[in-house]
Structure formats: structure tokens, C-alpha cells
Image: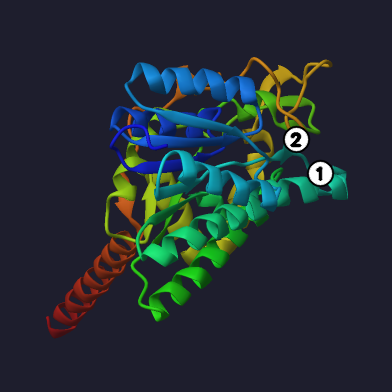
Amino acid sequence: MNQGNGPVVVVTGASAGVGRAIAVRFAEAGFRLGLIARDATALEDLREECARRGAHALPIAADVADAPAMFAAAERIEAELGPIRIWINDAMETVFSRFGEMTPEEFRRVTEVTYLGFVHGTMAALRRMRVRDRGTIIQIGSALAYRGIPLQSAYCGAKHAIRGFTESVRSELIHDRSAVRLVMVDLPAVNTPQFGWARAHLEKAPRPMGAPTQPELIAEAVFRAAHGNRSDYWIGWTTALTVLGNAVLPGFMDRYLARAVEGQQSDEPIAPDRRDNLQEPVPGRHRTEGSFSAEATAGAPLMAANAVRVGVVAAGALLFAGLGAAIAAARRR
């Protein structure tokens, strides 16, 4: 039975971090929510938080790596809430480790959640949206979809894969003249609980590279992107600089980002009893923000990726034209 009149949005990885912030933002806007994550207790807590904002939410405990579970979740959400208008793929896992110290099982698990979880979510959404020729699918990407960094090879590989997969499916939808939108939103480092519960084969506890962005700022940008008309967005200047810098000077970025080995480690040693969420949730720690709020940036502009690219090319062209004119004038003198 449908409850409420707002459109339906589905958020995967909804129990903590960016996913939780996104769910709350859509709840404030009057959406009905399908909430997907592994921890049923954390989802119930989020359901109550959405209810306090006047929104109806349906929590479904499921692992995004389990395709049948995702298809069943989508079916249940439409049966109980109504047609899905927006689907947001956000669930992720990472392992902070040098590649040579990871096990094949760890690499596979990160790939299954962070990449195949997006594939399964997109499949579940498209099966319904294409029939109605309406809907938006948001892929929560990263600057690391364009530029890999050390200590997160599995995560970076998965984010690169999401971008290629999304571009392929988007082209198919364009060919078929479908009105369904497939949108990629790439994020900077974000202050989420992942740094406190991700598996880590390090001496020091993981931390964000540089000053992170607060999840609430990301949620606001994602909300705007979901209602925009572009296919690719970047959040934050660090994302834009990372993407553009790698396009122009990939060799320099290789060497510059080698320092991220130390930049992603805090001064605190890894706790001997540290629990991680790679295979199962860590109970009682599902919050929106992580432990780095004091270092977080105050803003994170939402930028249409193509507009930034065009602007950079135009600025470069004007610069070279100006230099050419100055050289020509000097020669005439």
C-alpha cells in the first residue's frame, strides 16, 4: 500500500555516511524512501529519523552484492511504496592496504560490493524505469574513478569500472531514445565512518587524504544533481583538480600521489581490537559523520563536469591566443 504522496527514492548503503545523509535530505523534501543496507538495526534507526521529518521509509536489510536480494528489494519497494522515481547507488567497501598485502578474497569482496552492487542496483531500477520510460539513476562515484591512489587499489578499480559501465549503459539508453537518466556524481574525500571501520593492513589508522567534506554537503549536492539535467557532476574543487590534473599530467600525478601512502594514515596506531565491516556490519557505529569534522571543509560546489572541461579548454585557448598575439606584436616591434 502506498503511504504519502511524495515520489519514491531508493538509497543503497543508506545506514551510514553519505547514504544516510542523502536519505535524510530526501526525507526532508517529502520523498518516500526505500532504504537498503545490511544492518537492520541501523536501518530501523534511520527509518525513525526519517519519520521525525514527516517521511515514510521502508528499511530492507540486504547485501548489494546479492543480485536476487536486490531485485526482491526493488519489487517490495514498488509494491509497498509505489513506482521508483530515483534510485541512488551508494553502498561501498574498501580495504586500506598495499596491493601486495591484500588477499584475493578481500579484493573480490570490495569489487562485489563497490562495483557489482552498482550493477545490481542499476539492473533492478532499469527493469522498472524503462517500462515507464521515466526515472533517474544516480551513481555515487569519486575523483578516484579517474585517478587511482595508493592503498585503495580495489576501491579505485571498482570506481573506474562504475564509470565505464555507466557510460556504456547511458549510450544504450540514448540509442533507444529512453527518457531514463543515468547520472554520475563524483565525490571528493568525505568525513564518513568508513575510516573507523574499513579493513586496514596498516600500522597507523586510516584517515581522509587532505581536508574532507561533510556528508550533509554531499547530500545537498546529490539532491540537486538528481533534479538537474546533466549526466556528470563533480563535487568540490579537489575533485575537479584531480580529474583535470590527471588528464593533463598523469606522470606527475603518479609521483605526486605516491605521498598518499602517508597522507592516508593518521598519527594513531591501529587498535589491536579494531573491527571492520568488510564481511558483516559493525553494530552501533552507523552515524552520518566520521571522526574528522574539525578538519572538514566549509563548502563543496556542485559542478557540471562537461561545463568545467569546456571552460578549461576555452581558458587555455584564450591564454595561448594571447601569448601568440603578444609574441607577434613583439616581433613587429
Compare residues 293 and 211 and report the one nearer the observer: 293
Residue 16 image-quadrant placement:
top right
Q: Residue furthest front?
A: 1
- Taking the image as shown, residue 166 lies to the left or right of residue 283, namely left
Which corner quadrant holds the N terminus?
top left
Question: Label 1 sits on what residue type?
Answer: Glu
Question: Label 2 sits on what residue type?
Answer: Leu
Label 2 or label 1, whichever comes before in sequence order: 1
Q: Residue furthest bottom?
A: 332
- Taking the image as shown, residue 79 lies to the left or right of residue 302, namely right
Compare residues 224 and 133 and report the one nearer the observer: 133
What residue is drawn where x is 48% and y is 44%? Answer: 79
Above or below for 99 versus 57: below
What residue is drawn where x is 66% and y is 55%? Answer: 116
Disc 2, disc 1: CB below 8 Å?
yes
Tell me the CA gap for discs 2 and 1.
8 Å
Res. 105 in view = yes
Image coords of residue 294 (percent x, y): 46, 17
Which corner quadrant holds the C terminus?
bottom left
What residue is drawn where x is 56% and y is 37%? Answer: 36
Compare residues 122 and 2 and report the one nearer the observer: 2
Above or below for 35 versus 71: above
The secondary structure type at the circle numbered 1 is helix
Tag of residue 278: 2
Which residue lies under the disc numbered 1? 106
The secondary structure type at the circle numbered 2 is loop
Image coords of residue 104 (percent x, y): 86, 50
- Taking the image as shown, residue 43 lies to the left or right of residue 131, namely right
